[in-house]
Amino acid sequence: MSKTHEFGRDDSWEGVVIHKSRGMLDGSDMYHFVEIRLADGESAKVRIGHRLWKSIAVGDRIVKRPDADPAKA
C-alpha cells in the first residue's frame, strides 16, 4: 500500500526506488516523482528534481538529509 507523505525540508529519510513517474499536474509544469520503499517497510511517493530523476533507476537508493535535497546514495 502506498501513501503520499508530506516530507518537510527538516525531515530525513532513506529508501529504495520502486517506481518513477512524472506528470503535468497543473497543466504547465512537469513534476517528477519516485515511489520509495522506506526502511520500515512502508512506501511513499515523493517529489524530486528533474536532474536526480533522470540519474536514478528502479532499485537505486536515495537519501534525504535535513535541510538538503534528496540525493542518490
Image (cartoon, helix red, strand yellow):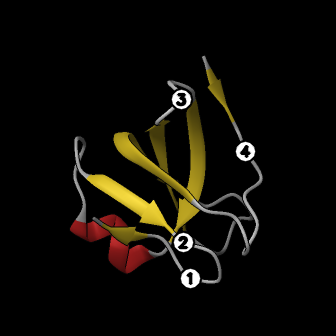
Q: Amino acid at mark 4?
A: His
Cα distance, mark 3 to mark 2? 17 Å
Q: Residue at x 48, y 41 (%)?
A: 35
Mark 1 falls on what kind of element? loop
Q: Tell me whether circle 2 and circle 1 mark residues in contact (CB < 8 Å).
A: yes
> Which residue position holds label 2?
65
Q: Residue at x 73, y 44 (%)?
A: 5
> What is the count of numbered marks?
4
Cα distance, mark 4 to mark 2? 16 Å
Q: Looking at the image, is mark 3 or mark 4 earlier in the sequence?
A: 4
Residue at the extreme bottom: 67
Q: Is residue 40 left or right of residue 58?
A: right
Mark 2 falls on what kind of element? loop
Q: Tell me whether circle 3 and circle 1 mark residues in contact (CB < 8 Å).
A: no
Q: Which mark is residue 5?
A: 4
Nearest-to-viewer mark from 4 and 2 = 2
Q: Position of residue 42 (x, y in %)?
A: 57, 26
Figure quadrant of residue 47: bottom right
Nearest-to-viewer mark from 1 and 4 = 1
> Which residue position holds label 1?
68
Disc 2 crowd rating (10 Å Cα; few below 14, some 14-19, many 20+) is: some
Q: Looking at the image, is mark 4 or mark 2 earlier in the sequence?
A: 4
> Which residue position holds label 3?
40
Q: Amino acid at mark 2?
A: Arg
Nearest-to-viewer mark from 3 and 4 = 3
27 over 49 or under it: above or below: above
Cα distance, mark 3 to mark 4? 14 Å
Figure quadrant of residue 67: bottom right
7 over 58 or under it: above or below: below
